[in-house]
Image (spheres, rainbow, N blue to C red):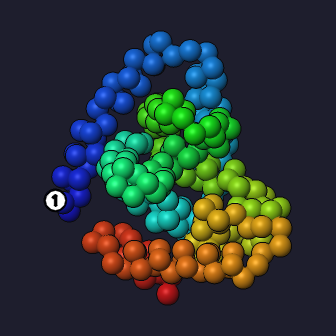
């Protein structure tokens, strides 16, 4: 518990510059910026309680394991990605759930520093108006899972109207499709990618010192 408090303090401290800029934008934000923020807020209100907890647990485990600790941006993840990029040339993601949600809502996917910075600031501002749980639910309710599978409609098409009956294991496989969207004609290579990702996430959940992820992994057995 003490380690978690220290980590949370570190994450918030590293985010102070972005937090400061986001506070200034509360007063001086351009109209286009506020339009995207209001769209995020509106969709969060609409879908913030639409997705069951097992899907949200799966999303946190797969996409943002420090979600409960950071303020909407994960500077440690960004530092890690930058170091990997410099040392090996490999490109990895460091976006939080909130940032991914902003990206989908704003429909901005350009690979630029400006877009990433904008995304971070919107995520910080959004979290001052809504809750992380609601954002995660709304994200899953509009996310692209692959061919003929978008958002809550896609989830209900696959699992039926009552999503509370879906197991954590099934939810995790669906969340894995955020990274590897289902193609029109799924082949063995795609199925292998999904299986490998799910297995890796189970291993992470069992190996981490974070008790909440250990409980998530245990429930999935």
Dot 1: what SS? helix
Q: Position of residue 184 (x, y in %)?
A: 83, 67
Asked whether 74 or 189 is in front, the reply is: 189
Quarter of the figure that contains the N terminus: bottom left
Looking at the image, is 33 positioned above or below residue 58? Answer: above
Looking at the image, is 220 positioned above or below residue 95? Answer: below
Q: Residue at x 23, y 53 (%)?
A: 7
Asked whether 77 or 169 is in front, the reply is: 77
Residue at the far left in the pictured view: 2
Res 198 visible: yes
Q: Position of residue 187 (x, y in %)?
A: 76, 78
Q: How many marks?
A: 1
Indicate left or right for 146 with 172 as reference. right
Q: Position of residue 159 (x, y in %)?
A: 75, 73
Indicate left or right for 86 with 189 as reference. left
Residue at the far top in the pictured view: 28
Q: Position of residue 101 (x, y in %)?
A: 58, 45
Query: Can you identify the residue that label 1 sits on?
Result: 2
Indicate left or right for 5 with 34 as reference. left
Q: Residue at x 18, y 52 (%)?
A: 6
Q: Residue at x 72, y 82 (%)?
A: 188
Residue at the far bottom in the pictured view: 221
Residue 185 location, quadrant: bottom right
Looking at the image, is 216 positioned above or below residue 59? Answer: below
Residue 175 location, quadrant: bottom right
Q: Residue at x 36, y 50 (%)?
A: 86
Looking at the image, is 131 positioned above or below residue 56? Answer: above
């Amino acid at each position: 518990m003490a380690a978690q408090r220290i980590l949370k303090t570190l994450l918030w401290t590293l985010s102070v510059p972005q937090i400061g800029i986001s506070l200034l934008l509360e007063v001086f934000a351009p109209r286009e910026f506020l339009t995207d923020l209001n769209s995020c807020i509106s969709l969060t209100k609409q879908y913030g309680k639409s997705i069951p907890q097992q899907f949200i647990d799966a999303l946190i485990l797969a996409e943002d394991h420090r979600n409960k600790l950071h303020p909407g941006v994960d500077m440690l993840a960004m530092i890690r990605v930058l170091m990997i990029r410099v040392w090996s040339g490999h490109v990895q993601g460091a976006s939080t759930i909130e940032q991914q949600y902003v990206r989908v809502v704003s429909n901005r996917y350009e690979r630029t520093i400006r877009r990433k910075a904008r995304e971070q600031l919107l995520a910080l501002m959004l979290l001052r108006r809504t809750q992380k749980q609601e954002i995660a639910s709304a994200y899953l309710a509009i996310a692209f899972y692959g061919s003929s599978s978008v958002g809550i409609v896609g989830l209900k098409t696959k699992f039926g109207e009552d999503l509370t009956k879906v197991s954590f294991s099934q939810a995790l496989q669906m969340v894995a499709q955020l990274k590897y969207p289902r193609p029109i004609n799924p082949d063995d290579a795609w199925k292998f990618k999904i299986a490998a990702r799910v297995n890796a996430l189970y291993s992470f959940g069992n190996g981490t010192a974070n008790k909440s992820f250990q409980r998530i992994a245990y429930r999935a057995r």
